[in-house]
Amino acid sequence: MWTILIKDLSEFVGKEVTLKGWLYNERSSGKVKFLILRDGTGLLQCVYFKGNVSEEVFELASRLGQESSIEVTGKVKVEPRAPGGYELDATGLKVISESHDYPITPKEHGVEFLMDHRHLWLRSSKQVAILRIRHRIVKAIRDYFDGKGFTLMDPPIITPAACEGTSTLFETDYFDLGKAYLTQSGQLYAEAGAMALGKVYTFGPTFRAEKSKTRRHLTEFWMVEPEVAFAELNDDMDLAEDFLEYIVQTVLKDKAEELKVLERDTTKLQNVKKPLPRISYDEAVEILKKNGIEFEWGNDLGGTDETVVSNQFDKPVMVHRYPAEVKAFYMKRDPNNPKLALAVDVLAPEGYGEIIGGSQREDDFDLLLSRIKEHNLPQEAFEWYLDLRRYGSVPHSGFGLGLERTVAWICGLDHVRETIPFARMIYRNTP
Ligand code: NSS
């Protein structure tokens, strides 16, 4: 007799096995009791016939509450109608810990209730599928960059200054050194890394004190940021499209089961192959105007604008060369039109909006210094960053991909709150 996992049942057909897990659901029909066991790897219907098991076992099977932790024993049978395709002709049942009045029942609950019980909600099949896909995406991201000669470099989380604008900084007191801030992006440190190692990527939590209460905003989210020395904007876009194709195609191949649990229609995801369309900001503005949207040149694209633009394409679209005014201080200006920044945003289809933001960086010392001043940033805190332009400056570029927005898009979820185990948002910092 073995203790095995539900995912491995196919190897044990006809054999007597023991499994450990939790009672996911149950139903009865007269002399038969069906217990649905979950063990984190799948679901298994365990069938207890009154005549085949001791009275004690049958009574226990009838009494246990949802999410009781249990050990079941029985013979594995093929049963195409059962979830997962197997069934346990059960004989034994032991309780590890009884559970009663589990707050999340198979009926519908409101999303705030579920978010309040996120620590338990994680156990449901859909949430398990999302977490598995998130894990696969994280691994695909690492595999991609590791396989292309990038070195993973971990930037600090406590930082002395803003990277992406001062309006979304989380501030904290830092001993005798005054204020410190939670990082908004590892980019500035990745730039130092690229000058040391050539190609690097950072991958970790980043923070934005976003006042936005939208389905795309978290205050704590994960971002992967490649940075490449001697790369210009076009190289950056080549990298972004190759990278996105790899991630999406890998998930489609390896996580088909989970996508099925989420009832994700994957037709549009199949399209995510290079080349991706590239349009300029000016062209995006034209598209907006043609679609009757009132949009003033010079503004950043809002959520609805992004949706209108991306709806014109059946793949993610790269929008490049934004007005410099609405972009970060470190972006290089377009030599052909200094009003524009050599920036690129990648907009996902199906209304998911911006998943990647990137740019070629300003590599000229004087220009960078004047940008720091224009943005009223404290020069002292950026002296180390200016050093990168003092000592062997080179053209370089990179981008940041938001993990949660990517998970939401690939899983087809309508809000990023379900893409991270414990979401942090403007109105939520628990559990
Ligand atoms: O602000 S970004 O557009 N760009 C940067 O932070 C650059 N420093 C990246 C770089 O070039 N190395 O953010 C990048 C991505 C963006 O496209 C979103 O996918 C995600 O990070 N992002 C967010 N996800 C969830 N919630 C919030 N608040 C959020 N902000 C950005």
Image (cartoon, rainbow, N blue to C red):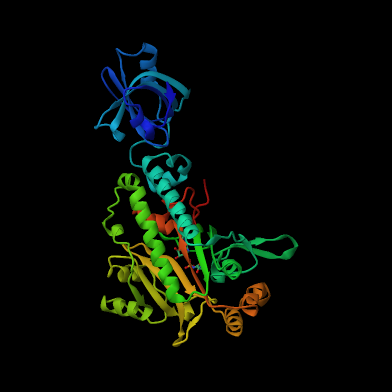
**Snapshot quadrant of residue 91:** top left
The residue at 42%/60% (across/down) is 216
For the image, the number of numbered tags is: 0
Is 423 located above or below residue 367 in the figure?
A: above
Please give the name of the residue rendered at 50% of the width and 65% of the height, measured from the top-left corner. 226
**Residue 335 place in picture, x, y as percent:** 47, 86
The residue closer to the viewer here, 241 or 181, is 241
Within the image, what quadrant is residue 50 found in? top left
Q: Residue furthest left?
A: 81
Q: Vertically, is 217 above or below 313?
A: above
Q: Where residue 38 sits: x, y (%)?
A: 39, 33
In the depicted view, which residue is nearer to us: 141 or 337? 141
The percent position of residue 255, horizontal first and vertical second, equals 36, 47
Does residue 422 lie above or below 331 as drawn? above
At 60% from the left edge and 84% from the top edge, which residue is drawn? 370
Q: Is residue 414 visible?
A: no
Going by the image, does 239 lie left or right of 382? Answer: left
Q: Which residue sits furthest right?
A: 176
The answer to whether 278 appears left or right of 211 in the picture is: left
Residue at the image point whose x is 63% and y is 77% from the top = 386
